[in-house]
Amino acid sequence: MNYFINKEGLPILRRMVKAIQENKSYLSDVDGLIGDGDHGMNMNKGFSLFGDRFADQNINFTNGLDELGKVLLNEIGGSMGPIYGTIFMEMAETAGDAEVIDLSLFSDMLSSGLEGLYDIVDARVGDKTLVDTLAPACDALKDALNEKKTFSDAILDMKKAAITGKESTKALAAKYGRSSRLGERSRGVLDAGAVSCCIILEAIADGIIDLCKKDET
């Protein structure tokens, strides 16, 4: 199928929570190389809070994104709370109470998350932030939509673009955040936000592909 049913989207949210929990130490290790090393701890706190409160409730994908965004915005420290909170809440608002989510709507959702992020940060592609992961992922979905690809194929393209974008941050010098103080010395290390964004997008991708396969059976 070229869509998944919104009310059946809880497994995607659970995948997101599990992915962050499983990579908590890795994210902090990456962050610790050029930052303050608390990225994994903060992300794990927010996603785990959401998981404890909502993972067993009858909540659809878009409402879950909104609730996750609120938790991250209001209850975790650091800069990532407002950043991810904004992304997820903008995604949820774009979809509203849609019964099904297809490629066109999901592309709009992710693009809205990026545009919402642009409203609160100055970082753009090439500045060694999660934008380097998220923007290419959005572009991949738009390209797939124009090429009339299936939802599953488009999601795989998104996943590949996110991974490539994340890897690109290794060669970049940081321009924002604590790591920007290192200047050229920040090259050679992945950006922690780009890594966590990639982990989240991969989890979303795998969850969507599973739901699309489920609808085919």
Image: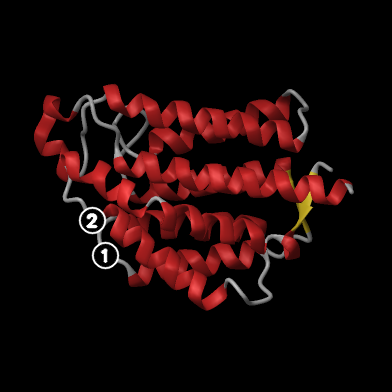
| Position of 80 relative to 125 (above/below) | below
Residue 128 is marked as: none
- Residue in the image at 66% along x and 46% along y: 106
Q: Between residues 39 and 149, which one lies in front from this camera angle?
A: 39
- Is residue 34 found left or right of 61 in the rendered image? left
Secondary structure of the residue carrying tag 2 is loop
- Residue in the image at 63% along x and 44% along y: 206
Q: Amino acid at mark 1?
A: Gly
Measuring from the top left, give residue 65's x and y in whole percent: 56, 62
Answer yes or no: is residue 122 visible.
Answer: no
Secondary structure of the residue carrying tag 1 is loop
| Position of 57 relative to 84 (above/below) | below
Q: Are marks 1 and 2 in contact (CB under 8 Å)?
A: yes
Q: Amino acid at mark 2?
A: Asp
Residue 77 is marked as: 1
- Is residue 74 found left or right of 59 in the rendered image? left
Measuring from the top left, give residue 85's x and y in whole percent: 43, 60
Choose top left, top right, bottom left or bottom right for residue 7. Answer: bottom right
- Residue in the image at 25% along x and 45% along y: 29
Answer yes or no: is residue 120 visible.
Answer: yes
Q: Earlier in the sequence, mark 1 or mark 2?
A: 2
Quarter placement of the N terminus: top right
Mark 2 nearby-residue class (10 Å; few <14, some 14–19, many ≥20): many
Mark 1 nearby-residue class (10 Å; few <14, some 14–19, many ≥20): some
- Work out which residue is located at the far right of the displayed protein and give it: 217
Which residue in the structure is indicated by mark 2? 38
Measuring from the top left, give residue 32's x and y in whole percent: 19, 45
Q: Nearer the viewer, mark 1 or mark 2?
A: 2
Q: Between residues 2 and 95, which one lies in front from this camera angle?
A: 2
